[in-house]
Image (cartoon, grey):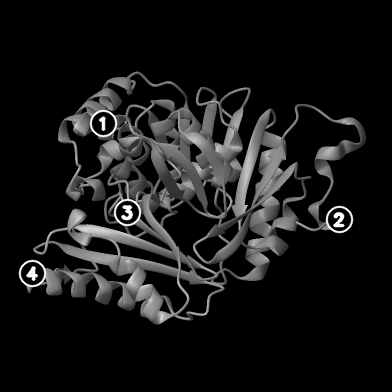
């Protein structure tokens, strides 16, 4: 039976952050998934049990890997309750197990996701109570089985969440005094940059080192799941195959490269940030791969002929507007004068301040850093002067 489960294909939905869908689709192609279709903050595909496990271990831009189990149209509350009860829930969880339901509702006659998840929970526990006289408990923090309910225009998809804890929580990050970038967003930005994983990679305002660590994991071919401390959601499923996961895990460990594959370098002005970055890098076992210096980016020069610069400079309201405009002007001047031959990528949520960079963007990619709408701005820093001085054209001439 287990053999059949391993090779049988089923539908899979993998969620991600807005703007990273195409990067995720490429990761799923690398795992030989079939029927890959890009959606809004999600990519659907078809794969088997091995590929489901591999997606959790290897996908750098995945947040959750879901296995849809039932789709139906819910006309009203009564109908939703009845439809959920048509599933034999004892095939999925035992009465002594805990579960939780994450519900997302949009453009439906049901207004509140909390109400929908409550109705679904009632249908499940009532079925157990009528059959056994007992009921499973709800645990929203660490459930044995996590269910995902997605309702759009009253069409409901119920899925099993194979990931459990969100995949962005890699496990290498220690408690720090820094508000760090989401790991999935960092990995997605590096993916969008087109970095070849061999040329020089620099984060000149590195904070706690998330860009650096994600880049090093890519260069060294380290699966992000290898850092994970918590079990995956699928480890509590009835068809869980421990030997299969062990094989995938061992294979991933064997694929990781020890010798540094690229020059990966970080700068930061703040000694506390540098200390936090070094602690996280050590926790990730990448101290031989990444170099971090306490330095002012504006006084640095490129250590090689070409490469990629990726940065997430300040853009929040705590910085005075005069300072932030000067900051972005200095970023532009430093890139133009000291990093010729590089491609630079600046993530910013302050589009007005970004106009002070004074360089022409070749790409503007909409992204979100948490709830803040941002742009990932690409600057191609050509060597020498270009005809018409194009590299000095100011961003103020056009909309970012």
- Which is closer to the viewer, label 1 or label 3? 1
Answer whether labels 3 and 2 touch (C-beta < 8 Å). Answer: no
- Which is closer to the viewer, label 3 or label 4? 4
- In the shown orientation, is residue 75 left or right of residue 229? right
Q: Earlier in the sequence, mark 1 or mark 3?
A: 1
Can residue 282 be seen from the camera position used here?
A: no
Inter-mark Cα distance, 2 to 1: 61 Å
Report the residue at 50% width, 71% height from top: 154
Q: Earlier in the sequence, mark 2 or mark 4?
A: 4
Question: Which residue extends farthest right?
Answer: 388
Q: How many marks?
A: 4
Q: Which residue is mark 3?
A: 161
- Which is closer to the viewer, label 2 or label 4? 4
- Which is closer to the viewer, label 3 or label 2? 3
Vertical comparison of 247 with 122: above or below:
above
Q: Position of residue 333 (x, y in %)?
A: 71, 45
Can residue 82 be seen from the camera position used here?
A: yes
User: Dot 4, crowdedness within 10 Å: few (<14), some or many (≥20)?
Assistant: few
Q: Which residue is mark 4?
A: 132
């Amino acid at each position: 039976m287990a053999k059949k489960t391993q090779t049988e294909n089923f539908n899979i939905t993998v969620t991600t952050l807005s703007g990273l869908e195409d990067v995720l689709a490429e990761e799923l192609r690398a795992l030989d998934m079939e029927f890959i279709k890009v959606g809004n903050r999600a990519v659907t595909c078809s794969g088997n049990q091995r590929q489901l496990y591999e997606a959790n271990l290897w996908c750098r831009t995945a947040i959750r890997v879901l296995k849809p189990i039932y789709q139906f149209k819910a006309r009203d509350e009564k109908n939703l309750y009845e439809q959920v009860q048509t599933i034999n829930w004892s095939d999925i969880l035992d009465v002594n197990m805990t579960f939780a339901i994450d519900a997302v509702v949009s453009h439906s006659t049901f207004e509140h996701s909390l109400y929908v998840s409550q109705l679904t929970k009632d249908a499940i526990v009532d079925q157990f109570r009528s059959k056994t006289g007992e009921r499973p408990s709800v645990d929203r923090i660490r459930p044995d089985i996590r269910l995902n309910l997605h309702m759009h225009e009253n069409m409901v998809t119920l899925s099993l969440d194979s990931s459990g804890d969100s995949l962005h929580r890699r496990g290498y990050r220690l408690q720090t005094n820094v508000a760090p970038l989401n790991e999935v967003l960092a990995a997605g930005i590096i993916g969008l940059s087109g970095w070849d994983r061999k040329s020089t990679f620099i984060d000149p305002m590195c904070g706690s080192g998330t860009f650096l660590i994600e880049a090093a994991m890519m260069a060294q071919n380290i699966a992000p799941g290898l850092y994970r401390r918590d079990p995956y959601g699928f480890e509590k499923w009835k068809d869980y195959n421990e030997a299969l996961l062990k094989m995938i895990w061992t294979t991933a460990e064997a694929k990781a490269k020890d010798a540094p594959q690229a020059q990966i370098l970080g700068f930061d002005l703040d000694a506390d940030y540098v200390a936090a970055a070094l602690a996280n890098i050590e926790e990730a076992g990448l101290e031989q791969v990444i170099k971090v210096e306490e330095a002012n980016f504006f006084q640095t020069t490129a250590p090689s002929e070409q490469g990629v610069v990726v940065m997430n400079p300040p853009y929040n309201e705590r910085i005075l507007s005069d300072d932030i405009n000067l900051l972005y002007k200095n970023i532009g001047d430093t890139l133009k004068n000291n990093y010729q031959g590089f491609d630079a990528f600046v993530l910013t949520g302050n589009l007005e301040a970004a106009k002070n960079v004074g360089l022409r963007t070749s790409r503007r990619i909409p992204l979100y850093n948490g709830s803040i709408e941002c742009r990932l701005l690409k600057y191609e820093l050509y060597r020498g002067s270009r005809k018409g001085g194009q590299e000095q054209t100011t961003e103020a001439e056009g909309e970012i």
